[in-house]
């Protein structure tokens, strides 16, 4: 009995020593992180003294809209997030941001107003602090409360959030930036992998900041666009700045097989199911004088061999007009898929952005003072804003490099609301999982329920997560 008691004491003592050793290692690591962060800040201040002239840049063609229409309640801010397989260390994330940001000129910019145009100027202010998430997603970024930066970073448990004012870049540019911050963070937290990878940016990461709209512009005949007022999803408004978020995760192979059985792409299938859900749950399956119109941003990079980190997309609209008394799901899907197929061709996409760029190139329009331009842009936007019911943004397949992939669980994205659009959806894929996310500022959850029920009826297994707004 005495020997047994002695062994217990020795085991307890060994555990205590081991625990103290682990605590000591953790404290040393935290101190090292803080010292590294302090050193990085000192170097940054030292380097800033070397600059005599600020860098500046033009806004790309799409970006020129966002400073004019952005405000509280219509932020034009979107979020891209990465979920790791471990909880996030805020100090390490701040250091990762400090190390990566100097490489990405676009994210270092602040917005200025000139006599004729808005423009970017290099921001030499201290970085905004990475904070633990404590507000709803996609809120307006007040530059004066954010050290004049047009993005912010936060974290929650195992999730890193990057929120971006659309004037800087689109979702593809933001994912590019987020991945590099994530890689740097993983290197900081897991120094044992530095023997496998260099402590530098990935060779796959583009730092290109060209204006691909202008570089690929071809003069076209001017075209007039007729817009028709679309179905607007109305319901009880959530409180100010509240956003209901619903994530749905599913097997890429399962949804691919179902889409293939209808002879459509995954994106066409998802837009079709979404349109069907609005038709059945919101319109109750009856005729409507107004169409269900879904804005679908198209990434132009693959069509024009661009690697820019600036905005480079155009928007097409998938139109379904319920003019007869009843439609089957397959009829709705085929109408939506055909609508997209007709528009998503290189020739048509080129026409769409070239028409917009031609206005920018017009010498007479360029000479108009900014205050008058802003008024005209706002009028055109307000007139066309209600031509779409909703938006579906597909960021495509996100790929990560080894050995980082083993630390990453998945990605997702969230869109803010805009004039006339009270619900939107994003889609992206990582490894074997497709994640789609609904965001809404009205209580119309029957649309989401109908959408997910249709997927499960088709044999697609869905795992759902929400932020609980609909159940508060």
Image (cartoon, helix red, strand yellow):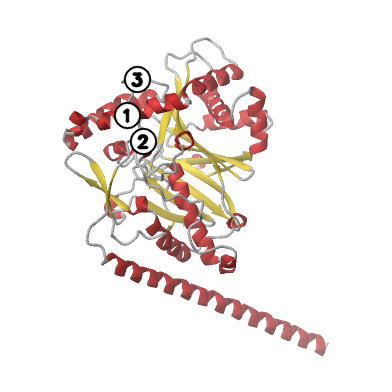
Q: Which marked residue is nearer to the observer: mark 3 or mark 2?
A: 2
Furthest-bottom residue in this view = 2
Mark 1, mark 2: which one is toward the viewer? 2
Q: Tell me the residue that label 1 is attached to.
A: 356
In the image, 17 versus 395, the foreground residue is 395
Residue sitting at 26 percent across and 32 percent down? 360
Front residue (pair 21, 305) = 305
- Give residue 364's quadrant in the image: top left
The local crowd at label 3, few if under 14, some if 14 to 19, many if 20 or more residues have their Cα within 10 Å, is few
Could you give the CA–CA distance between mark 3 and mark 1, rounded to whole angstroms? Answer: 12 Å
Q: Nearer the viewer, residue 121 or 423?
A: 121
362 relative to 290 in the view: left or right? left
Q: Is residue 118 above or below residue 291?
A: below
Task: Farthest residue to the right: give it.
Answer: 1
User: Which mark is first along the chain, 1 or 3?
Assistant: 3
**Which residue: 52% across, 22% down?**
341
Element at label 2: helix
Marks 1/2 in contact by CB < 8 Å: the verdict is: yes
- Foreground mark, 3 or 1, reads 1
Residue at coordinates 59% horizontally, 28% vertically from top-left?
A: 265
What count of labels does the image hold?
A: 3
Asked if the residue at tag 1 contacts the one at tag 3, i.e. Cβ–Cβ closer than 8 Å, the answer is no
Q: Which mark is residue 225?
A: 3
Which comes sooner in the sequence, label 1 or label 2? 2
Residue 18, image quadrant: bottom right
Residue 96 x, y percent position in the rendering: 45, 62
Q: Quadrant of residue 435?
A: top right
Quick check: 416 left or right of 60?
right
According to the picture, the residue beneath numbered tag 2 turns out to be 213
Image coordinates of residue 293 in percent, x first then y, are 45, 23
Vertical comparison of 149 with 326: above or below: below
Percent x, y for residue 47? 31, 67
């Amino acid at each position: 009995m005495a020997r047994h008691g002695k062994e217990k004491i020795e085991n307890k003592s060994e555990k205590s020593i081991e625990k103290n050793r682990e605590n000591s290692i953790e404290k040393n690591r935290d101190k090292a992180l803080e010292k590294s962060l302090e050193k990085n800040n000192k170097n940054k201040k030292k380097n800033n003294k070397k600059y005599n002239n600020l860098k500046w840049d033009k806004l790309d063609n799409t970006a020129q809209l966002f400073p004019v229409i952005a405000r509280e309640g219509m932020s034009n801010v979107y979020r891209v997030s990465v979920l790791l397989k471990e909880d996030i260390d805020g100090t390490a994330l701040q250091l990762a941001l400090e190390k990566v940001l100097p490489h990405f000129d676009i994210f270092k910019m602040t917005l200025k107003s000139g006599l004729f145009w808005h423009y970017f100027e290099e921001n030499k202010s201290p970085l905004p602090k990475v904070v633990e998430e404590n507000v709803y997603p996609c809120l307006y970024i007040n530059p004066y409360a954010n050290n004049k930066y047009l993005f912010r970073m936060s974290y929650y448990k195992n999730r890193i959030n990057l929120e971006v004012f659309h004037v800087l870049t689109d979702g593809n540019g933001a994912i590019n930036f987020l991945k590099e911050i994530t890689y740097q963070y993983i290197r900081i937290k897991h120094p044992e992998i530095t023997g496998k990878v260099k402590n530098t940016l990935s060779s796959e990461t583009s730092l290109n900041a060209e204006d691909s709209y202008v570089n690929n512009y071809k003069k076209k005949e001017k075209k007039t666009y007729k817009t028709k007022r679309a179905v607007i999803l109305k319901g009880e408004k959530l409180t100010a700045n509240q956003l209901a978020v619903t994530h749905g995760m599913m097997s890429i192979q399962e949804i691919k097989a179902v889409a293939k059985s209808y002879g459509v792409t995954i994106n066409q299938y998802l837009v079709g199911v979404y349109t069907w859900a609005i038709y059945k749950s919101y319109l109750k399956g009856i005729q409507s004088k107004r169409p269900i119109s879904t804005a679908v941003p198209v990434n132009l990079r693959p069509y024009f061999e661009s690697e820019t980190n600036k905005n480079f997309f155009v928007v097409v609209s998938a139109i379904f007009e319920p003019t007869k008394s009843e439609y089957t799901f397959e009829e709705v899907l085929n109408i939506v898929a055909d609508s997209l197929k007709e528009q998503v061709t290189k020739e048509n996409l080129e026409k769409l952005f070239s028409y917009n760029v031609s206005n920018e190139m017009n010498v007479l329009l360029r000479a108009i003072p900014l205050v008058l331009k802003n008024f005209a842009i706002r009028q055109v936007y307000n007139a066309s804003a209600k031509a779409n019911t909703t938006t579906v943004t597909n960021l495509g397949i996100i790929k990560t490099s080894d050995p980082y992939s083993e630390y990453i669980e998945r990605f997702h994205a969230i869109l803010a609301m805009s004039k006339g659009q009270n619900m939107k959806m994003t889609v992206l894929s990582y490894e074997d999982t497709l994640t789609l996310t609904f965001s809404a500022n009205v209580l119309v959850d029957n649309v989401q329920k109908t959408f997910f029920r249709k997927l499960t009826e088709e044999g697609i297994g869905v795992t759902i997560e929400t932020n609980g707004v609909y159940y508060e």
